[in-house]
Image: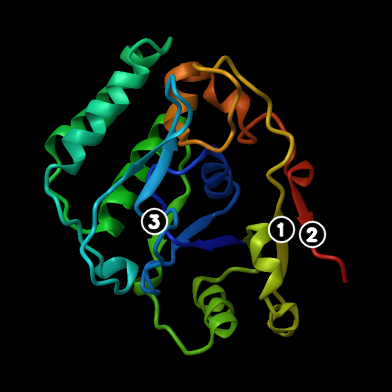
């Protein structure tokens, strides 16, 4: 039974994003839709001594589709790495885990938000041992209709179960999925354990880099990757 998730790409997302990737057979980056301002596409939070701090990739003034959105300052990556290093250099596993991230940030010439997000997501997946296939919505033929398009993407990709974030409950027409014999399962992001994090109080809603640099190879123990049965961190839809 092939499980699919379809979600816009985020910049160095939080741990819950990677739990969703891990629990499906194919994760489709929904990047040929409108770019949304003040969202997670080009920014995320890190922990600092003065509290959570936004790391934001600067983009141009014209907002198009996500996969058309480009950065406006080519020096953003080196600046971001400098900020990450400044705030995590004393984290217990920073030196052990920094190499693939440092390599990307100091050498990238990528100009499109979608490509930047994809490459960093792939790096994190490799660090966490996640082997899910990651594809693009543009790999498929797209039809009109917000929910109709999702259902059609699931059909084209062979999905029979759709894993969705809880926020989509407000707009998903579940009847369209039922007609297509596709099960919807809602992701439940509650119940994450805390770990030894710098700069208390503890904050769950920061980039996954915080978890990796603070816990190293033990990062999966603080996620829902391996130690919690799937039926305990997802909720099937109520008929």
| Sequence order check, earlier mark of 3 and 2 | 3
143 or 75: nearer the viewer: 75
Q: Mark 1 and mark 2: span between their CA atoms?
A: 6 Å
Q: Residue at x 19, y 30 (%)?
A: 103
Instruction: Answer with left or right where residue 85 lies relative to residue 73.
Output: right
Q: Residue at x 64, y 32 (%)?
A: 226
Q: Are marks 3 and 2 in contact (CB under 8 Å)?
A: no
Q: Mark 3 and mark 1: span between their CA atoms?
A: 22 Å
Indicate the position of residue 14 as horizontal and vertical percent values. 50, 40
Disc 1, SS: strand
Q: Residue at label 1?
A: 186
Say the numbered circle drawn on residue 236: 2
CA neighbours of label 3 inside 10 A, class few (<14), some (14 to 19), many (20+): many
Q: Residue at x 27, y 57 (%)?
A: 113
Indicate the position of residue 78 as horizontal and vertical percent values. 17, 34
Q: Quadrant of the C terminus?
A: bottom right
215 or 201: nearer the viewer: 201
Q: Mark 3 and mark 2: span between their CA atoms?
A: 28 Å
Q: Residue at x 75, y 38 (%)?
A: 229
Residue furthest right in the image: 239
| Sequence order check, earlier mark of 1 and 2 | 1
* Quadrant hosting residue 13: top left
Q: Are marks 1 and 2 in contact (CB under 8 Å)?
A: yes
Disc 2, SS: strand
Q: How is the image coloured?
A: rainbow
| Sequence order check, earlier mark of 3 and 1 | 3
Q: Residue at label 3?
A: 41
Q: Nearer the viewer, mark 3 or mark 1?
A: 3
CA neighbours of label 1 inside 10 A, class few (<14), some (14 to 19), many (20+): some
Instruction: Answer with left or right where residue 81 lies relative to residue 40.
Output: left
Instruction: Answer with left or right where residue 231 lies relative to residue 30.
Output: right
Is residue 1 at all visible to an observer of this figure? Answer: no
């Amino acid at each position: 039974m092939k499980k699919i998730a379809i979600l816009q790409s985020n910049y160095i997302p939080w741990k819950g994003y990677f739990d969703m990737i891990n629990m499906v057979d194919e994760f489709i980056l929904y990047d040929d839709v409108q770019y949304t301002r003040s969202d997670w596409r080009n920014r995320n939070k890190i922990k600092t001594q003065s509290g959570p701090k936004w790391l934001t990739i600067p983009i141009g003034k014209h907002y198009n589709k996500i996969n058309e959105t480009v950065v406006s300052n080519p020096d953003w990556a080196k600046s971001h790495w400098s900020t990450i290093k400044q705030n995590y250099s004393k984290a217990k596993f920073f030196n052990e885990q920094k190499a693939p991230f440092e390599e990307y940030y100091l050498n990238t010439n990528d100009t499109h938000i979608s490509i930047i997000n994809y490459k960093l997501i792939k790096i994190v997946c490799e660090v966490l041992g996640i082997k899910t296939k990651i594809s693009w919505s543009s790999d498929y033929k797209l039809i009109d209709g917000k929910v109709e398009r999702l259902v059609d993407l699931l059909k084209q990709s062979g999905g029979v179960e759709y894993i969705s974030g809880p926020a989509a409950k407000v707009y998903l027409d579940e009847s369209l999925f039922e007609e297509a014999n596709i099960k919807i399962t809602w992701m439940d992001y509650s119940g994450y354990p805390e770990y030894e994090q710098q700069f208390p109080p503890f904050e769950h809603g920061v980039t996954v880099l915080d978890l990796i640099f603070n816990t190293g190879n033990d990062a999966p123990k603080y996620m829902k990757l391996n130690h919690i049965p799937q039926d305990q961190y997802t909720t099937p839809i109520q008929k």
